[in-house]
Amino acid sequence: MDSQSFDYIIIGAGAAGLTSGQYGSRAGLKTLIIDSSSGGGQALQIAELENYPGVYPSVSGAAFSSGMIEQTNSFGTKIIQAQVTSIDKVKDSFVVKTKNETFTSYALLIATGAKHNTLNVPGEKELSGLGVSYCATCDGPFFKGKKIIVVGGGDSACAEAAYLSTLSPEVTLIHRKAKLRAQKAVADKVLKSGITTRFNSEITAINGTNKVVSVTVKNNKTDEITEIPADAVFIFIGTTPCVDLVEMLPKDEGGYLLTDECMQTIIPGLYVAGDVRAKSFRQIVTAAADGAIAAFHASKYIHDLKLKNS
């Protein structure tokens, strides 16, 4: 199987990968993006994107992603839909294999993102973007003064519940355990904020047709079933970074990939950007910044490598 050669290969066509593709192509790099889907990443789940700088009035995440893909194509980046099966480094070249093709490059970016852990209950998938959300910063402002349910008991759930309580006086936190597992200071903030808490409870269904109207909750101690009116359900039960292709790289306690401020890993020429990277804040704008930084440093790395080999 003959290989196709590129300067810069990006795995993942979310905000980080697409931005990096744009910056790579504009820097004169022959750039390829590979994604198992048609592209767009988690932005596709956003009903209205209103907090991305310069995008005003708000647009749907799907429209934003479509424009970003078109823009990336316009700079000359090649984007293909395929499942990457393996990554290797042979001397100064990365070898990326899919089921049917092999590609090589001088530099490689991992922008595979992270998956939100889900409840896997009826209504969750159907109402995603219609009241079901995994990002309070993105979607919280749409539910000012509304009935908000928050699911989870860790640091993220508690911090996001506290934030949402500044937008609405009707926030209920549902946690399947008997007490919050967040750090004490974070948990205390929730318990003192007036947020209603329901412990030993699990959501068994999210109800509604074109929007969330209620949740069905089961008490796992008494088996009592109740229905709680709701306009929004924010789910914070963790995320799982997509690191299957690069399990050998160092990670933080959550399994996210470690880099330096240049997005560089311990392997020269291998970069990481976006939600798969260890960092404190995950938003479309921070993913885009990661991708731009990675492309900038990858360009310098490739230039120096070509000089050395000339």
Image (cartoon, rainbow, N blue to C red):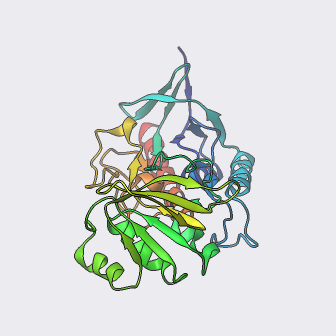
Above-or-below relation of 84 to 260? above
Above-or-below relation of 54 to 266? below
Above-or-below relation of 253 to 182? above
The foreground one among 125 and 194 is: 194
Can residue 183 be seen by looking at this rendering?
yes
* Rendering coords of residue 55 (x, y %): 71, 69
* Rendering coords of residue 116 (x, y %): 46, 52
Q: Residue at x 38, y 53 (%)?
A: 264
Q: Is residue 185 left or right of 232 when viewed as pictured? A: left
Q: Quadrant of residue 259?
A: bottom left
Q: Identify the residue at the far top of this view.
A: 1
Q: Residue at x 46, y 42 (%)?
A: 107
The foreground one among 218 and 238 is: 218
Count of labels shown?
0
Q: Quadrant of residue 32?
A: top right
Can residue 280 be seen by looking at this rendering?
no
The foreground one among 15 and 224 is: 224
Q: Is residue 277 left or right of 14 when viewed as pictured? A: left
* Rendering coords of residue 211 (x, y %): 67, 59
Above-or-below relation of 52 to 210? below
Q: Residue at x 38, y 57 (%)?
A: 224
Q: Is residue 67 left or right of 4 when viewed as pictured? A: right
* Rendering coords of residue 124 (x, y %): 55, 51
